[in-house]
Amino acid sequence: MAIGLALSGGGFRATLFHLGVIAFLRDAGKLSEVTHITSVSGGSILSAHLVLNWESYTGDEKEFDRAANELLAFVRKDIRGRIYRHAPMQILLKTPTDLLVDYYSDLYGHKTTLAHLDGEARPSLYLLTTNLTEGTLCSFTVKGFQDEKYNRECACESFSLGRAVAASSAFPGLFPCVLLTPDNSGIAAEDMGGHEVIHLTDGGVYDNLGLRKFQSLIDRGEADVEYVVVSDASAHFKIGTKGGILAPLRTSLRAADILSKRIHDLELKLAAPDKFMLVQIGQQISRDVDRQALSPVIQKRLESIRTDLDKFSELEIAALVRHGYCCARLRIENGWNSGTDLCPPWDPLPESKDPRVIALRKGQLDECETIRQELDRSSVRKLRLMSLKDPISYIHLALLFAIIAGYLLIPYLFLNGGGGVYVVKGKIDVAPGIADGITLFVVHPKITLPPIKPESTGEFEIKLPMSRGQMGDLNDLRLIVEHKDYEDLNINPAETNPQTQDYIIRRDENQYITDPKTNERILIAETITVDNIRLRKKAAGDIYTPTDSLETISDNLGRDSYAKKITGTN
């Protein structure tokens, strides 16, 4: 008896539900009778692995477990999260879809092509995709690329299997289109329908159940099957709307959801009931009929689990696989009376130590409330922008810390008084030997610096760490030049007169930044040069003492000298 199998879209939720259906078909001895498979999105992730490892899935229990565990490990990798964590670092090299292809190729093999799907007794596989260029339903098969509208088939056996699955599951909005060109597919240019590039996206845009394609195969006599098992784990239509500031966007998305629901319902209505057996995730199974079924409280939550490609927990995996198994058992036994004993469903995680998974396996109803709460949270999409198990996250943390630090420190340092530098440099015009005995003192009410010794040539440089607010207080800054044999000079670098007879003051090498809020240029560093500082020989018997309240006196040369003269006789 030939059987057909249609696997719907729905992300990893669909992959896991379908795996439960596959496990039942194997236990019922019907999996080996499957001759044709159509699949979409999350269904294609499983179907490609199923056909590629057909001998394992239809082999003994150990081989089946090995193949299934390989798929389960993939589902637990957080593919979507990894892609969007790595995408910023590779934005110039690869698109998110290219990264998706890489991850699929890790699962199927980087050198695996459509031609590798061929094999004795293997079913014919149709990986459905939507042709955005022409608005048609297309598919990838072992023979190549098929266009449903024009009923044409182009040979492209060398096309990557990972890229074909990506074309079937690249959900619009999250992943850019897969580009089909003569170069990457081997399709002859004349078979491209006049297009240099064909843009392909998620097959669920056109047919999220795989029914349309299967009906077409039956109508054309290409699939001679007794019946088709349709495993439907597609998105659940949620009742209700939300308002708020995002109401216009929500309205558009809601309208798209309603359109998708109408297409979904129409496809189911057109399916011949004597030919298509629906196994739906929303199906409720009474424990009076199947004691191995999940609690009704848990079953009801499964159709609301997110349709995503992120990491699924052990509880989500165990619940979806078990529900898929029991739904398939109920529908197939009631429809065709296979007589399969109600044995415990296949357990995808027999060694799990998660108490919720153990309770699920044993049917412990007292844990239902805990499991229900966890599955309620499973309906929420998680960003997963960080993961301690993904090394790229540590780079993101470092960059994030640098950005936050910069955002906080730069305004503090340059805009709000957090920092700035004044550099005062100059030269005392004395002989090198005399310069050795000179000491410079910096006097300012808000900063304190130790005494400074100039170079033997009399040159000096003083860096003053002053905030933006302090920069306006240059009038309070004094440089006191002291020598035991010479007069003390008190120099004000903020002198309004740029040139005196004793020294010359220049302001140069100024540095500015622009305030992003006011577009105002703000001084952050200023270099002041004081040249031609001259010291005069002290008069015999005179004592000059530097002080914070120096008086201004003038000598007979008219030079301004800042000092207080104290005679020794007073």
Image (cartoon, rainbow, N blue to C red):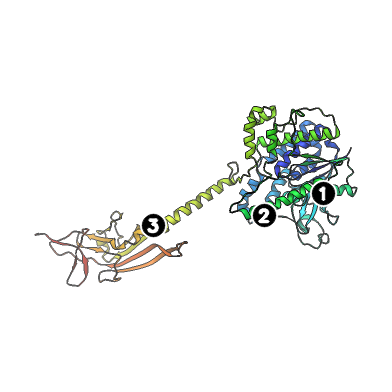
Picture quadrant where residue 289 is located = top right
Q: Quadrant of the N terminus?
A: top right
Q: Residues within 10 Å of mark 2 (few under 14, many from 20)?
A: few
- Which structural element holds mark 3? loop
Q: Residue 394: horizontal and vertical position, in percent?
A: 56, 45
Mark 3 / mark 1, whichever is N-terminal: 1
Mark 2 / mark 3, whichever is N-terminal: 2
Residue located beneath label 3 in the image: 417
| Side of 443 relative to 135 (left or right) | left
Picture quadrant where residue 374 is located = top right
**Does 274 appear above or below 341?**
below
- Which structural element holds mark 2? helix
Q: Residue 101: horizontal and vertical position, in percent?
A: 71, 49
Task: Name which residue type carries label 2.
Answer: Ser
Q: Residues within 10 Å of mark 1 (few under 14, many from 20)?
A: some
Q: Residue 535: horizontal and vertical position, in percent?
A: 23, 65
